[in-house]
Amino acid sequence: MLAKRIIPCLDVKDGQTVKGINFQNLQYAGDPVSLAKRYSDEGADELVFLDITATNEGRETMLHVVEAVAKQIFIPFTVGGGIKNIVDIRNILLAGADKISLNTAAVNNPFLITQAAASFGSQCVVVAIDAKREDDDWYVYINAGQKKTDILVREWVKAIEKLGAGEILLTSMDADGTQKGFDIELTKMVSTNSNLPVIASGGAGPVLEHFSEVFEKGAADAALAASIFHYRTLEIKDLKNYLDVKRIPVRL
């Protein structure tokens, strides 16, 4: 069995790391370059960097921040936010990212997934899905959670796999920032409807069981968290030691 991955996330606004609840009320959480180095040193398996206001502000990802982060870490690095076309993707990879994350651009232009996979390989293409539950199902949201689409998550995960995506970054908007645990039902639904690796995001608290549950019950391949790592309410090494004791495969 492949090792389960623990992935800190840097949500970046105006060059600074921020964190909110349900995509609202953003608070400063630290310098992204310093946090990235710390996570690389502390044993994180990968790092995700999301320029969360780039799309809504109609600008490109802050490449200078991406470059600064990339120079400090020695783990796989995914970058998203503000990507509109293949040129943006190339620039982000040249700045030091190993993968790119598409959300709004993938919904608006699904062919971009195929184009990116053909140009750089599916392993570079992560499709981020911001999901919110309504009427006993989940819908895809875009523009940093500001705009609802008519796309059902269960249908979108199948579509992006056929288009050439290599991985899914699944965020529960309902659980985001609540620290009450991952949305197990949503994660399991996506994991069982797709053959792609699934990174579960949204809701992790300083509770070790939150992570074992999303791996065992949600069938996630990786778990992403932000504030609990930023503020050291849970240490990566303690989490990995716990998962190892639970016989959940992790890289120690």
Image (spheres, rainbow, N blue to C red):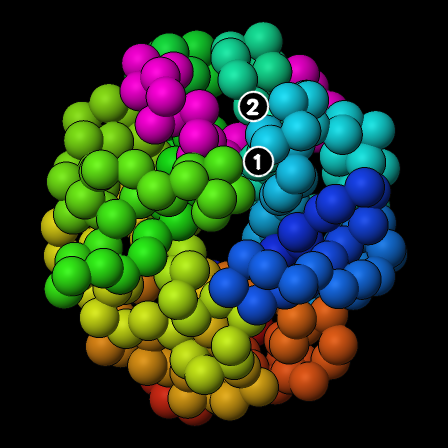
- Residue 239 horizontal/vertical position (percent): 55, 82
Instruction: Tell me the amino acid under the disc marked 1.
Output: Gly
Front in this rendered view, residue 20 or 98: 20
**Distance CA(mark 1)–CA(mark 2):** 7 Å
Residue 149 position (above or below residue 212) = above
53 and 208: which is toward the camera: 53
**Viewer-nearest residue: 27 or 225:** 27
- Residue under the image location 37 percent in, 81 percent down: 212
Residue bearing mark 2: 83
Kindly identify which numbered label has been placed on residue 80: 1
Question: Given the image, on which type of amino acid does mark 2 rest?
Answer: Ile
What residue sits 60% from the left and 16% below the top? 88
Residue at x 58%, y 53% (from the top left corner): 46
Question: Is residue 164 left or right of 136 when viewed as pictured?
Answer: right
- Residue in the foreground of this view, choosing between 164 and 228: 228
Residue 53 placed where, x, y %? 65, 38
Q: Quadrant of the C terminus?
A: bottom right
Position of residue 176 in the picture relative to residue 66 (left or right): left
Q: Which residues are magenta?
A: 91-113
Residue 238 drawn above or below residue 226: below
Q: Magenta stretch: residue 111 in it?
A: yes
